Image: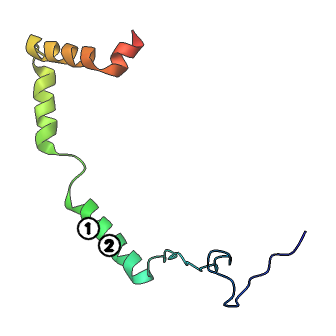
């Protein structure tokens, strides 16, 4: 078997000459700089501190609903049943 030779003389047409390999370098992701990382951490801490984990108004609403003997009412139960019947997950379990 003959070795492959890259001919560069002008007598060989471009179709016959093997294509020259092109070096395409893909950009490598750079890790965030320490300054960026600390800014992201600071923003995350500010976001976590800005909103309380428990909302007092929702807790009071939940307490009222639990104390109401008519909750959930028939309308809510019907909507829940319709939603369950339309759900693929629920139908697959039957």
Q: Quadrant of residue 20?
A: bottom right
> In terms of depth relative to the viewer, which is nearer, 22 or 5?
5
| Quarter containing the C terminus | top left
Left or right, 66 with respect to 5, comes to left
Residue 35 drawn at (x, y percent): 39, 83
Residue at image position (33%, 20%) is 88
| Quarter containing the N terminus | bottom right
Residue at image position (50%, 77%) is 27
Question: Marks 1 and 2, Cα distance to the nearest angstrom?
Answer: 6 Å
Left or right, 37 with respect to 85, comes to right
Q: Quadrant of residue 61?
A: top left
Q: Residues within 10 Å of mark 1 (few under 14, many from 20)?
A: few
Residue annotated with mark 1: 46
> In terms of depth relative to the viewer, which is nearer, 17 or 69?
17
Residue at image position (21%, 53%) is 52
Numbered disc 2: secondary structure:
helix
Please determine whether, in this image, residue 69 is positioned above or below residue 19: above
Q: Residues within 10 Å of mark 2 (few under 14, many from 20)?
A: few
Number of marks in the rendered image: 2
> In terms of depth relative to the viewer, which is nearer, 5 or 81?
5
Left or right, 63 with respect to 27, comes to left
Residue 63 drawn at (x, y percent): 14, 29
Please determine whether, in this image, residue 55 is positioned above or below residue 16: above
The answer to whether residue 70 is visible is no
- The dot on residue 27 is none
The answer to whether residue 73 is visible is yes
Residue annotated with mark 2: 42
Tell whether label 2 touches label 1 (CB within 8 Å).
Answer: yes
In the displayed orientation, state which residue is furthest to the right.
1
Q: Quadrant of residue 87?
A: top left
In the displayed orientation, state which residue is furthest to the front.
11
Numbered disc 1: secondary structure:
helix
């Amino acid at each position: 078997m003959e070795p492959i030779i890259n001919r560069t003389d002008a007598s060989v047409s471009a179709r016959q000459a093997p294509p020259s390999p092109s070096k395409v370098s893909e950009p490598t992701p750079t890790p965030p700089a320490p300054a960026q990382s600390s800014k992201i951490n600071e923003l995350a801490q500010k976001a976590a501190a800005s909103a309380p984990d428990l909302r007092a108004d929702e807790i009071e609403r939940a307490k009222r609903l639990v104390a109401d003997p008519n909750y959930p009412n028939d309308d809510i139960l019907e909507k829940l049943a319709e939603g369950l019947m339309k759900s693929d997950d629920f139908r697959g379990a039957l």
